[in-house]
Each structure stands twice: as C-alpha cells, then as structure tokens.
Image (spheres, rainbow, N blue to C red):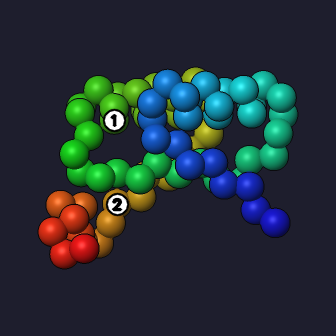
C-alpha cells in the first residue's frame, strides 16, 4: 500500500500535510496537479513548502492543457 498526499496548495491541504508530518503518518509521495492556471504565488508556496518539509512535492502537469480538457469534456 502506498500513501499519496494530494496537495492543492490551499490552506486546508497544506495544513493536512503539515499535520500528517507532525503525527509521523506514512507519506510515500506528495503530488500537486498543475492546471496551468495557477497564480505565480502558488508556485512560490509549493517551493517554500518543499524547503520547509525537506521533501519533494511532485508537480504533475497534464499532457493535454487543462482548458482543452474542459472544452473536450
């Protein structure tokens, strides 16, 4: 079993991640899905968070841009 944290970068998912780390809960991966519509401050937040927790946050970028997926589906 793998423990993957989905991080939106907002206050709730950030607080959840920090609490999981504080409680020493198992975390195998941390993933952030980049819609391509993020404000520059979100990328800054993700970078600061990585430095703070001393762990990599995988940034997942879709092969097809998010707006194209919205149009298609």
Image quadrant containing the C terminus = bottom left
Picture layout, residue 44 above or below residue 30 = above
Q: Report x, y in % for residue 19.
A: 72, 26
Q: Give the residue number, with chain letter if any, for mark 2.
A: 61
Q: Position of residue 14 (x, y in %)?
A: 55, 29
35 shown above or below 64: above
Label 2: state its secondary structure.
loop
- In the image, residue 66 lies at what x, y percent? 24, 61
**Residue drawn 74% across the image and 47% down it:** 27
Quadrant in which residue 53 is drawn:
top right
Residue 5: tell me if it is visible: yes
Point 61% across, 25% down: residue:
15
Q: Mark 2 or mark 1: which comes first in sequence?
A: 1
**Residue 22 lies in what quarter of the image?**
top right
Q: Which mark is residue 68?
A: none
Q: Is residue 1 left or right of residue 63?
A: right
Answer left or right for 29 relative to 44: right
Residue 48 in percent (x, y) is at 46, 25
Q: CA distance from mark 2 to mark 1?
A: 13 Å
Query: Considering the image in quadrants, where does the N terminus appear?
Result: bottom right
Q: Residue at x 74, y 55 (%)?
A: 3
Which residue is the extreme one toward the front? Answer: 73
Residue designated by label 1: 43
Determine which quarter of the picture holds residue 43: top left
């Amino acid at each position: 079993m793998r423990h993957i944290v989905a991080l939106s970068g907002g206050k709730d998912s950030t607080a959840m991640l920090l609490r999981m780390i504080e409680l020493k809960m198992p975390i195998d991966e941390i993933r952030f899905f980049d819609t391509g519509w993020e404000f520059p401050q979100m990328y800054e937040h993700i970078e600061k968070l990585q430095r703070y927790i001393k762990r990599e946050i995988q940034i997942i970028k879709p092969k097809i841009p998010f707006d194209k997926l919205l149009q298609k589906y």
